[in-house]
Image (spheres, rainbow, N blue to C red):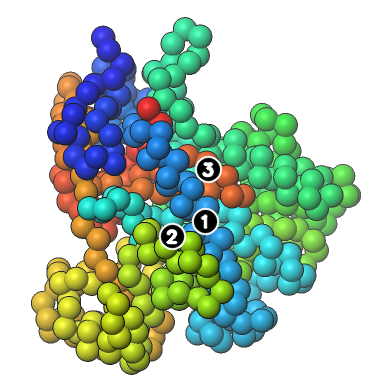
Amino acid sequence: MDTYEDLGTANGHPWFGRHRLRPAAPADTIRQLLRHELRDTGWPYQRLLPAAPMAIPRASYAEIFRASAALIELLRRTALETGATTAERLAAYGMPATENRLWMRDPFVEERYADCVVRPDLVIGPDGPRFLEFNVSGALGGVVETQSRLAVWRRLHADEDGRTPFRSPSPFAVRAEMFRSLSTELALAPRVAVVGSARVTGVERRYFEMEADYCNAHGLTARFFEPEELHQAWDCAPRLRHPVGLRNFTIPDWLEAGLDTAPVQDALDNGCLLVGTQTSTFLHSKLTMGLLSEGRPWMTGAERDLVETYLPWTRVLSERKTDREGRRVDLLPFVLGNRHRLVLKAGLGESGKQVVIGREVDQAGWESAVGDAVGAGSVVQDFVEPQTCRVALIADGSDEPHDAEVAPVLGPLVFGGRPAGMFCRFYGDGTAGIVSVRAGTSSSDNVMVVI
C-alpha cells in the first residue's frame, strides 16, 4: 500500500498541499494506542480521533515557524516598551491585582526569559496563515498532547530501520534542550523543577510526570513539584537544588482551585528560575497584539509588512481614531457598524472565553458587548474565514476511517525560539470558529508534520 494519498484539489486550500498520509493500522489499533498514550493526563474523551498525522508541505511548515519566531520577538519588544518598569506596565495594561505577584528579584532576568514558551494560535485564511492570538505561558496546552500523538504515529509509521515518512520535532526534546541552554547560560546545574498541581480541575499527576520522566531519561535531572513540595527545590544542599524549571500553571487556575502561590514566590526569591516568567502575561495579553497590529514607531518597513501579512487587523478598543484600509476612521462607530466583519476579545480571555464573533450575534447583542468592552482592556479583530482540509477520522464504534472537511486551528510550539512541533485542533463535523477540545462531541486534536 502506498504511504501517501494524492487528494489533488480535493484537499481544500492549497496551503495544506495535495498529499496526506494513509492510516498505517486498523482503526481499532489506532484508537487504542491514541487513548493509551493520553491516559491519566486529564485530557477529555474524544468521540472522533485522527487516523493519521496531518501532513503539510515543507514550505508551509517552515513558513509557520519562521513567521512565529519573528512575530514573537516583535510582540516581546511591544510589551516591554509599554513601560520602563513592571509597575508601569501593570498600570498600562490595567492588569488585575491577582497578576501582580511571582516576579523575579532581578528585573533583567524577569524580562529576559518571558518568551521561553509560546504557542500562537492561527488559521489558514483565504490568503494564507493568519495569527489570531499568542499564548505565552509555561502552562500551554498542546505540549503533552503533541508528544503523545507523535509517539503513536512514529510507532505505526516507522519502517524496520525506524525511519518515518514524515518529520516533526519532539516537544519534550526541544524543551529539554531549552533547559540545558538555560542552565549553561546561567551557570546552573541542569536540574529541572516541573511546577504544577494535579488538584486543578481537568489535570492528573501523570500530565506533569511525563515530562519529568522524559528529562530523567535524556540526561537531565527533573522532578514534578506540587506547591507544598516546592521548598525542596531550593531549601536543601546545593547539589540537590532544582534551580531552573517550568511554571506549568496559571495564577487564575490555582486561585480557583484554592492553591497558594506563596511557595512559588519563595522559590523565585531563593534563586529558582521558572519559565515563562510573570512578564509573559504582558506578551500573552491580546492588547499587545493590538498595539503591534497598529504599528510601533521603531518598526522597520519589513517588520510592518510582516505584521500586515500575518496578523489580522486588530485594535485596542476605545473611543479614538485609527487606521483602516488606508484611511482614518472613528474606531467605535466603525466597530458598531461592521459587526459581521469583526470579533471582540478580552485581553486575558482563555480557551475561547470572553470572545464574541460578530456574525454569530444580533446587532443588539453586539452593541451590548462592545459597550461593556470599551475601555475595559479588550480588542477588536477582523474575522478570518478558516479554510478547510480533508482528513481521515475514526469514530467510536467504527471499523473504518471516514473522510471529513475540517477547519483546523494550528498551534506551533516554540520553546526557547526553536520549533517544537505543531499542535492542531478542529471539529470533526466541519464546524469553524472557536475550537476547544473540552467542548462539543465532535472536537478533536492532532499534530501537523512535514510530509
Gap in angstroms between the C-alphas marked 2 and 3: 19 Å
| Res 294 visible | yes
Percent x, y of residue 281 = 54, 69
Percent x, y of residue 441 = 20, 47
Percent x, y of residue 262 = 67, 69
Amino acid found under the numbered disc labelled 1? Ala
Q: State whether residue 179 is above or below residue 289.
A: above
Gap in angstroms between the C-alphas marked 2 and 1: 8 Å
| 243, 22: nearer the viewer | 22
Gap in angstroms between the C-alphas marked 1 and 3: 12 Å
Amino acid found under the numbered disc labelled 3? Pro
Circle nearer the N terminus (2, 1): 1
Of badges 1 and 3, nearer the viewer stands 1
Residue that carries the numbered disc 2 in the rendered image = 306
Residue that carries the numbered disc 1 in the rendered image = 70
Q: Residue at x 46, y 52 (%)?
A: 67
Circle nearer the N terminus (2, 3): 2
Percent x, y of residue 250 = 52, 63
Residue that carries the numbered disc 3 in the rendered image = 419
Q: Residue at x 28, y 20 (%)?
A: 4
Q: Secondary structure at mark 3?
A: strand
Q: Quadrant of the C terminus?
A: top left
| 128, 412: nearer the viewer | 128
| Res 144 visible | no
Amino acid found under the numbered disc labelled 2? Leu
Q: Is residue 86 left or right of residue 158?
A: right
Decide: few, some or many residues near mark 2? Use Cα within 10 Å; few <14, some 14-19, many ≥20. Answer: some
Would you identify the image quadrant in which residue 247 lies? bottom right
| 105, 285: nearer the viewer | 285
